[in-house]
Image (spheres, rainbow, N blue to C red):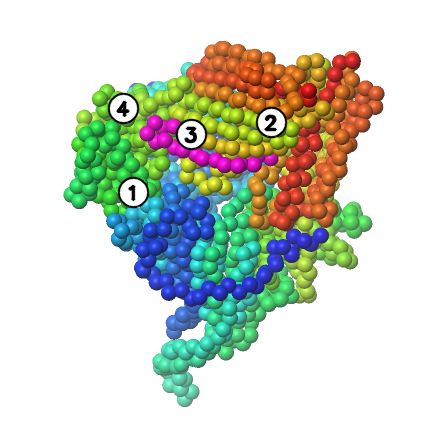
Amino acid sequence: MRLFFLFLFFTVTHTTSSQDYSFIKIKPSLLKNSDAVVRLDESTILVKSSDYMEVTSKRVVTVLNESGSKHVNATVFYDKETSIKDLEALILDAGGKEIEKFKEKDFIDQTATGEGTLYSDSRVKFLRYTPIKYPYTVVLTKKYTTSDTAFMPRWYFIDGYRLSVEKSEFHLSLPSNMKYRFKDNNLETFGVQKSNNNIGLSYKVVDLKALESEDFDPEFRDFAPNVQLALENFHLKGVDGHATTWKEFGSWIYNSLLQERGELSSATTQKIKNLVKDTEDPKEKIRRVYQYVQDNTRYISVQMGIGGWEPISANEVDRVKYGDCKGLTNYTMALLKAVGIDSYYTIVSADSSMRSLDYDFPSLQGNHAFLNVPLDGEELWLECTSQVVPANFLGTFTDDRYVLKVGPDGGEMVKSRKYLPEQSKQITTAKITIGENEINAVVEIKSTGIQYNQKYGLVNDSKEDIEKYYKHYWDYVNDVHILNHDVKNDKDSIITVENVEFKTSGYLSKAGERLLFAPNMLNRNEYVPKRGKDRSRDVVIKRGYLDEDEFLIELPDNYEIESSLKTIDLKNNFGEYSVSLIKVSESQFKYNRRLLIKPGVFSNTTYDDYRNFRKEIAKSDKNKIVLLKK
Amino acid sequence: MKLHLTIIFAIISISINAQSSDVKFGKVSIEEVSQKQHVINSDAEAAILFKKERMFYNYSSGKGFGTTREVHLRIKIYNKSGLDWATRVVSLYTSSSGEQKIYNIKGYTYNLVNGKIEEDKLKKEGSFLENVSKYRNHVSITMPNVKVGSVIDIQYDISSDMVGYMDDFRLQYGIPLDYVELSVEVPEYFNFKRFTKGFHPISLKESQSNRKINYNYKTKRDDSFGSVGSKSTNQLAELEFFEKHYEINAENIPALKEVDFTNNIENYRSAIVFELESTKFPSVGYKVYSKSWEDVASSIYKYDEFGNELNKHRFFQNDLDAIIAENKDSNLLASEIYKYVQNRMTWNDYYGVGCNSGVKKAYEDKKGNVADINLLLTSMLRYAGLKANPVLVSTKSNGIPIFPTTNGFNYVIAAIENGENFILLDATEKMLAINELPIRAMNWNGRLVREDGTSKEVSLAAKNISNKFIFMQGNIIDDGSVEGKMKTRLSDNLAFDYRTENYDKTQDEILKNSSTLFENIEIDDFELKNSKAPDKPLEYSLSFNYEGQVEVIGDKLYFNPLMFLTLNENPFKLDAREYPVDFNYSFSNKISATYTLPEGYKIESMPEKITIGLPNKIGMFNFAIIQNGNLLQVISTTKINEAIIPAFYYESLKEFYGQMVSKQTEKVVLSRL
């Protein structure tokens, strides 16, 4: 107890004395692979009550080159609940001498409404500084107070790649009667020191070397040191909360943010009942209600105050026929309830990085809402912001991760749907007719699972855009002339069927008397991962898939194959790849290809194997046969 | 060649006989609501069925003239991608000197329900005013109950106290515009230039009418016989004047969508632009804003942030005198001053014709906006006795400056006049050589403005063709790899692009990047020359070992004659194109490769030489291949002589690239002896 105080005291005096931030003081080991060096990153959170906290921080960054400027982070967000008390930046030259000073009014003040949002009340102040010379140093001090204690900032001792850290410190201090929880991750390997007790926490680390990003990295937060925090009693945009478990979190969301927002007018209730009156099948009911939502609403995001967390009422959505994810999910839930089907508002961290809500650390997390409908032991999922996605389909935005299901009994962590590689399947069949100057291809592509995710949008594209899509999809085929195309989206079986016919005069390469033809004309996988020297982290492949291709190839008259393809059959931990070309008749050959990519976490030592596997595929997909005139 | 200029500005005045409509806000027809797809463009996601704008001047006794712009849009949604058109964002200018405000926002959504039209009214909660930045507010309007098939009526008014400024009137979009009615009514006191732009012809009708306004004014009566104070009385007066009316009625303006190689789509979409030329108020008299280029030149010199800044030199005198003393030759002197400014100054990424910090402060801070830096440069050149003047420029993102205007420009560079020749200088980039410009500034013509009020049009196109010359020597190995050496020399804008991209990088980092450009390549002995010397050609050399470049099929070897430098893909994929292709600058790409063949192999076949050209010498491709013992020499030259290629050459250009690709991908075949 006593010691802890001393420690805090020591750090405070230490930083108030003036520091030498000249470039030459940086240890050479911290300059390696870095674009910027964090000389000091210090933050203190002082919680005074469940609805008031002060966050004071000082960040000193020496920027070594242009790419390093992004690590300055001279940004502060604010809104009605958060006010900036102190904001100042000093610019130092390489020698550590002050050359410029920016006060709060010199920061640029603008809306923080992001892309895809119509309006939000969040704003941002940031520093816009044009360096005249590298290196330079920015000393940023800021302080803000907020009543939103539901969000305790997560502390990263190192907050990006190509950035080294001289010293990073983090302190939390709060009244002894306020309970809090914390979880720290990956501290040991980075040598972070810590002390904690009932009135606070303190962490410190020195000399963190810069990390380089690598292809197929794990998520940064999964290997970089960081601390998560949460208060047991918290406050969010004027609403009090209490939670220590996901169950309690769910209860809080249900009782404080969702209750009584699901009422519908009797007219709408009647209308929706009529919609399903001729069916007893609950699945069909769900399908119709979801279709109704898709045909009658659209996504408009407006985030104001608690509206950033609380859905607009079902009645309101029913009237204007638009809403954000929360509003549309809540609306769909209300409509389903009207036809006697229970469903669950579900919170997820949505993006393609497949990030789970933290299973072990219940706190306010996630950025999206969608709907879970349990049905006879099966879990159905509805993404209510899309007008086109089929019922019970999840794309890369929300698949395979821990999400929080919210209901009257509280919250429950469940995994959203995972697609096995065999379910994320693309089958391409084609008839390729080679003429002496021109090739004609009649192609059918069927896609399901994650591969469906990349295709269903095509249905709504214009003819022009679809043609453009195919020209880019087959960009290694020159001079593609689309003769006709048709894309069908079967929403019941969740499959797209594309039928395309095109001709090209730019695919055969001439070699004197001979013609060179690469049989894999329609589904090449040319991607080869970057060469990785001294791979240090695990290789994470998030999603797998399966491609099956069968092309019937008709040779031009009077030509025969002088040199054919070698049969390939590869199998390893990363997947399977096989290719064959078989003679069907005098003028016809059948090309078969199968590629299975498996998801998984593989040890760092296997990176080269993975790269070689992909290299082999890329090479083989380009292999050519030689045609010679008889 | 000036072909591209005529294309952009060919304003064909075909009068469109559209009759004035009887479309009224809030009255949609059952046909409009039940329409399933656009009549002409069945692919359209949405269409603007009707657009009406009326802009007029209103007068209030307290404030004088102000403008009001009434807007009415009727939009039809055909499919789900079109739903975005149910949300409109109106951008409003705001500052201490003038402000645009929006009011009377009204809207209805119409849907067909059981054969009847049902309407939903836009309520307050559907519109949001947001301060985006210091000079800009946004009003976002989102309509209720919109689905596929809906028709939306939106109406709003924008008032402005900036009486001399009108936003452009847009007449073409990414979706079809079926009918547009535009009316602009301007009191005789204001004289505006008009210009239509874009490919779709639009004709403007002009007429006049009389207008009367009643206004109050106060008169002060001074008793000159010693009584204290003065009395004022309100007087009512009537002012009669004539107004000019400009009208557009047009229909069926097709959608114009953006494709690759486009500089700024709004350059090609039709619009009408109004720019204040002069004002003539009874009490003030005639005042010219921008009538001719001469007016632009003389008026811009009157701006404090421009003309004044060119007269300040005390702060740099000492530094500059030293440079002058060392350089007697005037060409050398110009180049030394240019380099000095480039080295000293850092551009803060802000555009502008006027200075932001002012040249003196910028000089001290060593940074500033475009005008701070280039007016400083101009001023220094002048001080050194050179005939230097600023050149006003409109950047590519800003569009093409179509008539004499100061507003139309957003960038300024410096020029040294040397008889009929101009040397152009832009010191915002450290890696530019003298007489080179960055792509953003290479937008058609600039306007050189002299102190005496004269001006001159100056072409901003690159002065020199940018050359890329690659010399390669390789040994072909019978395992399918090729090893050898390569030397690349870049000039002008190609060199500038390379230098800028790699400015910050170490040689190792550049090497790492180039290895990832091509898989399976190993690069060694990388050496970069003149990477920081813009006035010299940039050179880099390397040795390489490249696996899999030669295909070993059976006992034969097949390879592309340009190996990994082959152009494998035609960049032009679309079947047709409506507006010019912008290459930014003319260029030439010459590759000379010499291969040593592996022992025990002979050439069985190789591609034939070819020369193809584009019409009017716009471009040419030359490919030659010669065998000499066990050496094979290939020379490939591609030249595009114009930065901007008009759309009617698109087919030729696509064909040209197609032939180039097929020639470069034609294989050399080696077989065993």
Image position, residue A46 (x, y; %): 32, 32
Q: Are marks 3 and 4 in contact (CB under 8 Å)?
A: no
Task: Please give the name of the residue rendered at 41% of the width and 89% of the height, measured from the top-left corner.
Answer: B225
Residue type marked 4: Glu
The residues colored magenta run: A475-496
Residue A313: which quarter of the image? top left
Element on which disc 4 rests: strand
Q: Which residue carries the number 4 mark? A: A379
- Mark 2 in CB contact with mark 4 (< 8 angstroms): no
Residue A525 seen by the camera: no
Residue A482 lies within the magenta run:
yes
Look at the picture and state if A617 lies above or below B638: above
For disc 3, the marked residue is A497
Front in this rendered view, residue A536 or A473:
A473
Between the residue at mark 2 and the residue at mark 1, the CA separation in whole angstroms equals 48 Å
Q: Specify whether residue B556 is painted magenta.
A: no
Going by the image, does B255 lie left or right of B475?
Answer: left
Q: Nearer the viewer, mark 3 or mark 4?
A: 3
Point out the frontmost of discs 1 and 3.
3
Residue A513, picture quadrant: top right
The chain under label 1 reads: A
Label 2: chain?
A
Q: Is the C terminus of chain B in the top left, top right, bottom left or bottom right quadrant?
A: top right
Q: CA distance from mark 1 to mark 3?
A: 26 Å
Residue B634, percent from left and from top: 77, 29
Q: Which mark is residue A434?
A: 2
Alpha carbon distance from label 3 to label 2: 24 Å
Which comes before the other along the chain, label 1 or label 3?
1
Q: Earlier in the sequence, mark 3 or mark 2?
A: 2
Tag 2–tag 1 contact (CB < 8 Å): no
Q: Amino acid at mark 1?
A: Asn
Q: Which residue is mark 1?
A: A296
